[in-house]
Amino acid sequence: MKAGRSKRVAGRPVFLFILIGALVLSFGWGGVHILAQSGAAASDEQRARTVSEQTVVNSTYEVVSVMVPTWQKSAELARSHVSAQRVDGRPLARVADGYDVGQRVIHDEQSRKTAFPVQLPEDEWQRRLSPEQHRIIRKSGTERAFTSELDKNYEPGIYYSRATGQPLFSSEDKYDSGTGWPSFTKPITPEAVAYFYEASFFFRSVEVVDSLSGAHLGHVFSDGPEPTNQRYCMNGEALVFVPEGGDPPELLLPQAEE
């Protein structure tokens, strides 16, 4: 009996190495990093189970499209509506002057069903988005690798949320990750995006959404280049690129607060 137990124990490291190897091949070192994060987040998961309902305060279904002169003004207006939002007592998104990966607020996946500052009935989202955009943005889908024209676009400019017109990323932070999806080292402002754990196979990935509407953008991994070592792997269908000097898209905001 003892010999049998020894063989089973000895086989575990081999299985672990095989699993890690598969994660690296499929998702890069970001996948392994997220696997390590899963255990650390277990207490958050247990806490979330005690919450019967996740809500964000001051949400409304009444929205208005606002013309903005610059991405900075757009970001300022978006920040004013995101800064006070809470999910189970925690900030929906961290409002800060500079990006710090250690200060990101990552919510439990159960909180993903929460209400966001900008909400629309599902039939209205379907009217505003193409079927493929709706599948990705509203159903957390993923476009096929190397299909987005934005993957190899390195023209100076700003990338906005297709759902809300909120500025999300700058061309200054874009790089070629070789994955087939537009990739960035950080968001244009820390509070432009919100984060949620998402169950995926053997580990939990970190989903990235726009902080105004919760529109699915992609995922973030910790295998990017310096200075942040982050890879924001985004769906091109969820983004709108405006070249430098171009007019920003209209910004969707809660009407009751505007």
Image (cartoon, grey):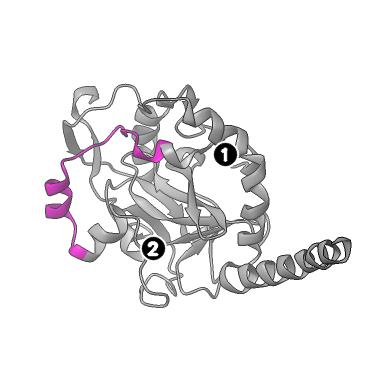
Q: Is residue 151 above or below residue 56?
A: below
Q: Nearer the viewer, residue 154 or 57?
A: 57
Q: Nearer the viewer, residue 99 or 108?
A: 108
Q: Nearer the viewer, residue 212 or 21?
A: 21
Range of the magenta residues? 111-131
Q: Position of residue 18 (x, y in %)?
A: 69, 72
Circle 1 sits on which residue? 104
Q: Is residue 11 above or below residue 158?
A: below
Q: Position of residue 147 (x, y in %)?
A: 36, 77
Can residue 115 be seen here? The reply is yes
Q: Position of residue 165 (x, y in %)?
A: 29, 48
Circle 2 sits on which residue? 235
**Which residue is at 41% across, 49% downward?**
168
Q: Is residue 106 above or below residue 245?
A: above
Element class at badge 2: loop
Left or right: where does residue 187 sit relative to residue 3? left
Q: The C terminus lies in which quarter of the figure?
A: top left
Which amino acid lies under the numbered mark 1 shown in the image of this protein? Arg
**Which residue is at 82% across, 68% downward?**
7
Which amino acid lies under the numbered mark 2 shown in the image of this protein? Asn
Element class at badge 1: loop
Q: Is residue 90 above or below residue 67?
A: above
